[in-house]
Image (tube, helix red, strand yellow):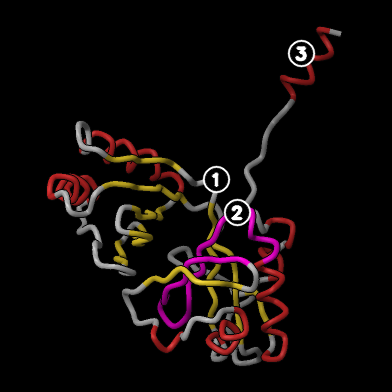
Amino acid sequence: MLNSTTNNTSEFKPVMQSPLHPFGLAAKQEKINDSKGAWANEIPLLGYISLRGNSQNAAFVSAVNSALNITLPTQACSMINAAWGSILWLSPDEWLITCKRDQRASFQQSLEAALAGIHSQVVDNSGGYTTVLLKGKNASDVLHHCTVYDLNMLQAGKVVGTTFGKLSLYVHQHENGYSLVFRRSFADYIWRYLERSALPYGFGIAQLNDGQ
């Protein structure tokens, strides 16, 4: 029995999958065109770092700016984009940093080193979130079926936490569309809700570039 157990354990090879992997989106994607009004796809397996601290503490803000070589957004519902990803303001003492998954360890280490001795928290939460991009001429119409938030108020550089059906997510503009950031456990519900809301306009799986 020990040998059998040992063999089974040695043969176990875990595979990392995005929460929307069961929908087979990669096999269905196509270049965005005018045949459909709404296009969406998941950006799978990004890095998500949760940052907490006092935005009124100049030492905290300075340390973060130095570690990331970027200005921490401290205004309510603000965000900032960088070549490597983005920082979303979630509350007066919480931010969500998104980056490529292979960058998350270096960002976390840089932040922890810079914030040593400063009251703060840096947590790799990459297993807890995912992001879906929604584009197309009817992208706003689709979202209006899903949320009570007035998307006309969603200006560039702004991120809001809002309802999505019975759940919630964060939404901000992304180029000519929207970026939806939500918890991994919400993925199945949110994707199905999005699909259903987009059906009247035509719904397609968008081919995403490496840079999204």
Residues packed near mark 1 inside 10 Å, few (<14), some (14 to 19) or many (20 plus): some
The correct choice, above or below, for 108 with respect to 172 in the image is above
The magenta segment: 167-189
Closer to the N terminus: mark 3 or mark 2? 3
Please give the residue where the numbered disc 2 appears in the rendered image: 184
Q: Quadrant of the N terminus?
A: top right
Residues packed near mark 3 inside 10 Å, few (<14), some (14 to 19) or many (20 plus): few
**What's the residue type where badge 2 is placed?**
Arg
Q: Is residue 206 left or right of residue 107?
A: right
Closer to the N terminus: mark 2 or mark 1? 1
Q: Are marks 2 and 1 in contact (CB under 8 Å)?
A: yes
Query: Which of the 4 image quarters holds residue 194?
Result: bottom right
Please give the residue where the numbered disc 3 appears in the rendered image: 6
The correct choice, above or below, for 96 with respect to 9 in the image is below
> Majority secondary structure of the magenta segment?
strand
User: Closer to the camera, 84 or 53?
Assistant: 53
User: Closer to the camera, 72 or 18?
Assistant: 72
Res 58 visible = yes
**Magenta segment includes 82:** no
Closer to the N terminus: mark 1 or mark 3? 3
Residues packed near mark 2 inside 10 Å, few (<14), some (14 to 19) or many (20 plus): some
Q: Gap between marks 1 and 3, in whole Å?
A: 28 Å
Q: Gap between marks 2 and 1, in whole Å?
A: 7 Å
**Magenta segment includes 174:** yes
